[in-house]
Amino acid sequence: MTATPEAGTITMYSTTWCGYCRRLKSQLNREGIAFSEVNIEEHPEAASFVEQVNGGNQTVPTVLFPDRSAMTNPSLAQVRERLAL
């Protein structure tokens, strides 16, 4: 669940109830930015990764980039910048 995303794409760790996740997904879809989504409530290993990145907290959306860096609740502009789009 923490496989490195392909160049130009991201992996977004989320939950079904997260409004910030829904907003970011909508923005990514509108901009045509490819992403895979992992629900941390369904995948304990993904929840552990999110906790590692966020000081023990299961904060979503957490986004994993192709360079293996991660951001918590990034804006669309931050995602575009990190992907150099």
Image (cartoon, grey):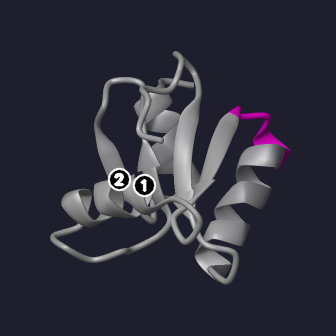
Q: Label 2: how many residues lie within 10 Å, few (<14), some (14-19) or many (20+)?
A: some
Q: Is residue 18 magenta?
A: no
Q: Position of residue 21 (x, y in %)?
A: 63, 68
**Image position of 56 with respect to 67: above or below:** below
Residue drawn at (70%, 32%) of the image:
34
Q: Is residue 58 left or right of residue 85?
A: left
**Image position of 71 with respect to 69: above or below:** below
Q: Residue furthest left?
A: 55
Residue drawn at (72%, 69%) of the image:
22
**Image position of 16 with respect to 84: above or below:** below
| Amino acid type for the residue under numbered disc 2 | Met
Q: Is residue 10 left or right of residue 32?
A: left
Q: Predominant secondary structure in magenta? A: loop
Q: Position of residue 70 (x, y in %)?
A: 32, 46
Single out the mark in the foreground, 2 or 1.
1
Q: Which region shows up in magenta?
A: 30-34
Give the alpha-carbon distance from disc 2 to disc 1, as whole Å: 15 Å
Q: Position of residue 78 (x, y in %)?
A: 45, 47
**Camera-side residue of 19 and 45:** 45
Q: Quadrant of the C terminus?
A: top right
Q: How many marks?
A: 2
Residue 46 got which mark? 1
Q: Label 1: how many residues lie within 10 Å, few (<14), some (14-19) or many (20+)?
A: some
Q: Determine which quarter of the picture holds residue 81.
A: top left
Please name the residue that numbered disc 2 is placed on: 71
| Amino acid type for the residue under numbered disc 1 | Ala
**Camera-side residue of 58 and 29:** 58
Q: Position of residue 64 (x, y in %)?
A: 42, 42
Residue drawn at (52%, 16%) of the image:
7
Helix, strand, or loop for circle 2? strand
